Image (cartoon, rainbow, N blue to C red):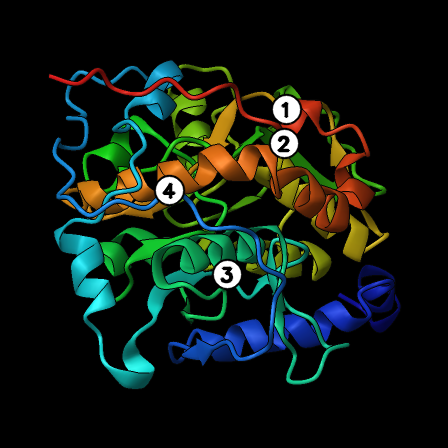
Amino acid sequence: MDAARMRTRLRGWGGVGAMAVLCALALAFVLLLPRTQAHPAAGAGPAGRSVADGSQARADDCVESSAQNRTPPPSGADGPTIDAIKARKGDKRKLIVGIDQNSYRWGYRNPGTEGAELEGFDIDLVHRIAEDILGSPDDVQFKAIPTSQRIPAIQDGTVDMVVRTMTITCDRLRDVAFSAPYFKTGQQLLVPDASAIKGYDATLAGKKVCTAAGSTAYGRLKADRERKALPATTDFSATVPNQLDCLVRLQLGEADAVVTDGALAASQAAQDPTVKVLGKPFTTEYYGVAMKKDATDLVRRVNRVLVDYRSDGWQASYDKWLSATLGEDARSSRPPAPKYLRES
């Protein structure tokens, strides 16, 4: 690629280039980012002191279209998982949460703030959960987790939960538990402005498509190529640890298209005017808070927080972080009223 073409590719990248460098550095270590700045009180959820019963859904009979309903009913009660979190001493008495630090307006370091504070829609939700469980929105220890490491970080106890634009699926329910959904989205294409690709169709023949390892986008591409809904020559063999890395590859001409959640694609298009979101979503997906499979009391507690958050907090966070990229009308992004597992 000659220098002129490179400059064209990178035009509009601006501060995102610096963010990409930070992203690359972040993969070399796990960031521990305790929060200290104050946040407005959001109101505590219902309290109660009893052990929450029940267990997370089995996934062997899961149906993808209703995977988001496979969660225990909400409860404000404590239990063994929450007790263990509250028993942490001193500076370690924090809710440990896996997040992204380079998804613009979702979970990202804002270079315009002192200390490059973590901000975004997902970060707001984390603060609300921490306040409910531990009493302060700042009782959080953030850990930056690559897309591909979200489930392992939960399973090995590196984090208590992951709040990181993570789609609820039947496959993932075999490994982790999810809260009720807190956001609705769908897969879309991100392409350069001058791309000849017309949509998620035959124009992807011979094209290099980038996805993040462990993402629902990769699974969808694989399934669609196997059932011949996509050309056999569509190449999505090269995956990356973090979704933002796909945008960098697109900028450098190393990928022809990116498949990712439309909510993330819109934020990335807002960062870089040389790329665009193409077509309408071709899936329906729901983000949930992911936790250990046996952490039923924590799942119930997060569901209790979400009941209040949907009516007091969700819209304000959407207006602040996402309305500029997804539009002022948030109805298409609001998940349906949750349906919980029936008590046995």
Q: Nearer the viewer, residue 278 or 232?
A: 278
Residue 220: x and y, percent? Answer: 44, 28
Left or right, 11 with reference to 103: right
Quarter of the image where the N terminus is located: bottom right
Residue at image position (53%, 33%) is 234
Which is in the foreground here, disc 1 or disc 3? 3
Left or right, 134 with reference to 324: left
* Spatial separation of the CA atoms under disc 2 and disc 4: 38 Å
Q: Going from the N terminus, do you reach mark 2 or mark 4 first?
A: 4
* Spatial separation of the CA atoms under disc 2 and disc 3: 20 Å
On residue 281, which mark appears?
1
Residue type highlighted by circle 1: Pro
* Residue position for label 2: 188
Q: Are marks 2 and 1 in contact (CB under 8 Å)?
A: yes
Which is in the foreground here, disc 2 or disc 3? 3
Q: Going from the N terminus, do you reach mark 2 or mark 3 first?
A: 3
Left or right, 19 with reference to 177: right
* Spatial separation of the CA atoms under disc 4 and disc 1: 37 Å
* Spatial separation of the CA atoms under disc 1 and disc 3: 23 Å
* Spatial separation of the CA atoms under disc 2 and disc 1: 5 Å
Callout 2 environment at 10 Å: few (<14), some (14 to 19), or many (20+)?
many
Residue at image position (52%, 50%) is 43
Residue 156: x and y, percent? Answer: 17, 61
Q: Are marks 2 and 3 in contact (CB under 8 Å)?
A: no
* Residue position for label 3: 100
Residue type highlighted by circle 3: Asp
* Residue position for label 4: 46
Image label count: 4
Which quarter of the figure has residue 339?
A: top left
Callout 4 environment at 10 Å: few (<14), some (14 to 19), or many (20+)?
few
Q: Going from the N terminus, do you reach mark 2 or mark 1 first?
A: 2
